[in-house]
Image (tube, rainbow, N blue to C red):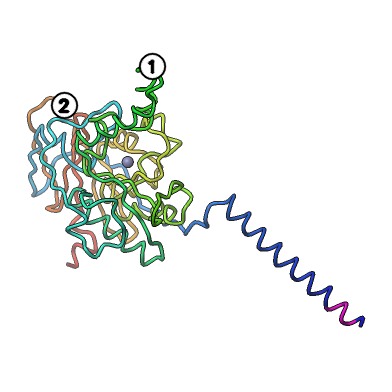
Amino acid sequence: MKNIRKKIAGLTAAVVAVVGVAAFSAWACFVQPEEMPAQAVPAYQIITEKDTSSKGDTTIVINQKDIYNGNLLLVNPWNAIPEELEDISLRNLYEQYPDRNYQLAGTNMMLQEEAARQANLMFDAAKEAGQENYLLRACYRTQDDQEEILEDELEKYQSLPEDQAENKALSKVAKPGTSEHQLGLAMDVNVYVPGQWSKAFGDTAQCGWLTGHSWQYGWVVRYDEDKSDITGITNEPWHFRYVGVPHAAIMVQKDLCLEEYLELLRQQKHIKVTDEQGETYHIRYVQLGSQPSMTLRIPSSQYAISGDNLGGVIVTWKDETSPQVSQS
Ligand SMILES: [Zn+2]
């Protein structure tokens, strides 16, 4: 009899313990974000080069139009989409990537070609790392799209005086002409939950993985809470911007938003960065201002040009003596 009582008492204690653990887990789930996957931290060697001379076998002619095209264009509340932006080559993700590892909020989701390619590689890697169910909620937008979104937002504040309604709406939606989505270099990412939007993307493991690895594919989280006075946009953990490799890695490593990164390039004029694999890139900032064109010679045939939308042009080239390049 004594033994049976002991057993019952023991069982009761075990049940209480299990319920207690379950209750604690439920509470923990409720108040804490999901456990975040490990983040990849860039460890680039970043050196300021004193040499800003123009020498090498490759000649590049930089024109005014180059100020207003490319992956590093700065578009924010104070710098509108440039009129000189040329026809951008957009890719329809629904049509061109049937094997994609993410969901699309519509069949007309588009990104610029390079950004689209890199986004696909990024979501493939996410899946391999066990992170799935990403939903691309918004990609490229036209001026009309952006105007429509602002109109919809304004309708929510109909009861307010016009100027107050406008201020409210513009705190949530970028003024048409100043949205990065109009560049085809931005996407809003969310978690796909059938039948509903997942609102708290910032607390999900999917967001954790993407935030920690997107730089490896040239994408960055554009609007950080700590930088909102510089970017003019409040915390948006879902908004990713394509800037390209190696710029994304440097921005993450040095904790710079795009405004700060471009300022760094303007001041340093020439930086040399080497990634973990020994691949070396040179980044040269050229202030074109009102000059119609300028000629630059560089010692590599592998380069990319982007304007900053502020009078400058950034030329990025890969060192041809990098181990990977010389082997191939
Ligand atoms: Zn966005």
Q: Quadrant of the N terminus?
A: bottom right
The disc at residue 214 is none
Q: Find residue 265 and report its image quarter.
A: top left
Q: Which residue is mark 1?
A: 161
Q: Residue at x 63, y 54 (%)?
A: 27
Residue 294, percent from left and from top = 9, 34
Q: Which residue is mark 2?
A: 289
Quarter of the rendered image showing ligand 1: top left
Residue 23 horizontal side relative to residue 250, left or right = right
Q: Quadrant of the C terminus?
A: bottom left
| Above-or-below relation of 152 to 45 | above
Q: Looking at this view, is 74 or 234 the one in front?
A: 234
Secondary element type, mark 1 = loop
Whether residue 326 appears in magenta in the rendering, the answer is no
Residue type at tag 1: Pro
Q: Looking at this view, is 286 or 109 the one in front?
A: 109
Q: Residue at x 26, y 46 (%)?
A: 139
Q: Looking at this view, is 282 or 2 the one in front?
A: 2
Q: Nearer the viewer, mark 1 or mark 2?
A: 1
Looking at this view, name the residue that lies furthest to the right.
Answer: 2
Residue type at tag 2: Gly
Q: Residue at x 61, y 55 (%)?
A: 28
Residue 206, percent from left and from top = 42, 56
Circle 2 packing at 10 Å, graded few (<14), some (14-19), many (20+), is few
Q: Find residue 229 and report its image quarter.
A: top left
| Sequence order check, earlier mark of 1 and 2 | 1
Residue 46, percent from left and from top = 34, 47
Tally of marks: 2
Secondary element type, mark 2 = loop
Q: CA distance from mark 1 to mark 2?
A: 42 Å
For the record, the magenta segment spans: 3-7
Circle 1 packing at 10 Å, graded few (<14), some (14-19), many (20+), is few
